[in-house]
Amino acid sequence: MKGRFGKVLLVSLIIIVVIALSIGLYLQHPKFGTLPAGARLERIKNSPHYAGGQFQNLLPTPEIIGDNLFSTLWNFLFVKKERLVPVDDIPSIKTDIMALDKDEDVVIWLGHSSYFVQLGGKRILIDPVFSPSAAPVSFANKAFKGTNPYTADDIPIIDYLLISHDHWDHLDYPTVISLKPKIRNVICGLGVGSYFEEWGFAANIVHEADWFTAVKLENDFTVHVLPARHFSGRMLTRNKTLWTSLALVTPEHRIFFSGDGGYGPHFKQIGETFQGFDLAIMENGQYDKNWPYIHMMSEEAAQATEDLKAKALLPGHAGKFTIANHPWDEPFQRINAASQNKDYRLLTPMIGELVELANEQQVFAPWWEGMN
């Protein structure tokens, strides 16, 4: 009996060791990136927004709230929710990006938080995710049917790749690698450059910046790296790289991109600093009452747009991936209701549909209505 028990114990230990080694080897995949070190880490330590070994929000920002953290997580993971994923394919229009006049100022929503922008003769890509999932494993967080009409082959030479933060649904390793030959410059928050260094990008094209920093690489076009109220980290390690919002400025137009984050006074400060925007591209989705400080409710996105003094609102962060337990189409319904009788115009294009910055008469149909 003892001999049999010893064999079972040995086999169990071997299985545990094999599993641990397999996980360890898997975590060495370059998609997980490396944490900032060396000169990059020393620069980070000099940031006024870095303390105690982590980046800090401008305001206290707990990731999850609730009377009982265990019950909060249990309900999120195991209590059944309705209509998280659409039955129907998400509709899209595949605009030929290659054929666009480069001097035309336009924006194309590519799904979730991914955008193609032409501004001041520059071609810009924001948080591109063309993969069928937004997670470290392919079976998790799958994209809705119909939401991936674009691949790297459809994208022209990119003057600026902008990355708001390092979460899987914003910084996608396969997409970035497939676009690598087309990318001339990368602009990101402090520390995020460690991923691009790991992925073989030349150091001279990766420009990392702290909040309230203007990155001006050429005349008549500036990217301002600005605060967001969020967090960072690919796995369990948190806040070693900076999360950001962004402002794109030319003499003709100003565009704000919120990245991910909760509502806060930084929106009003940014609106006053830039004296308004032609377009605010705002997070609207993946919200929950148990994490109200790291993702905005739709009504808060509407208020933030007013704070920014924006002429138009283009909502995103919905319609492609399920990260929160709300119906897939609820963010579109709520932002539509919250935007009634506002001074800004609500723009709700389908994936791939062209938004013309100079066309203040442009309207879009509520494409999500009637879908299952």
Image: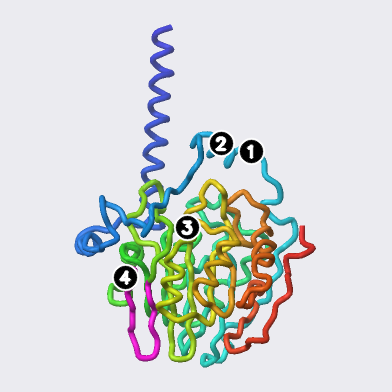
Three-letter code, disc 4? Glu
Task: Kindly identify the residue that appears in the image at 54 percent across and 64 percent down.
Answer: 283
Q: Position of residue 101 (x, y in %)?
A: 56, 92
Three-letter code, disc 3? Trp
- Closest to the camera, between mark 2 and mark 4, is 2
Do callouts 2 and 4 mark residues in contact (Cβ within 8 Å)?
Answer: no
Residue 74 has which mark? Answer: 2
Front in this rendered view, residue 88 or 200: 88
Sequence order check, earlier mark of 3 and 4: 3
Q: Where does the magenta region start and end?
A: 210-225
Dominant SS type (magenta):
strand
- Closest to the camera, between mark 2 and mark 3, is 2
Q: Which residue sits furthest top? A: 1
Q: Position of residue 304 (x, y in %)?
A: 52, 67
Three-letter code, disc 1? Val
Label 2 vs label 4: CA separation? 38 Å
The residue identified by callout 3 is 168
Sequence order check, earlier mark of 2 and 3: 2
Magenta residue check for 1? no
Sequence order check, earlier mark of 4 and 1: 1
The residue identified by callout 1 is 79
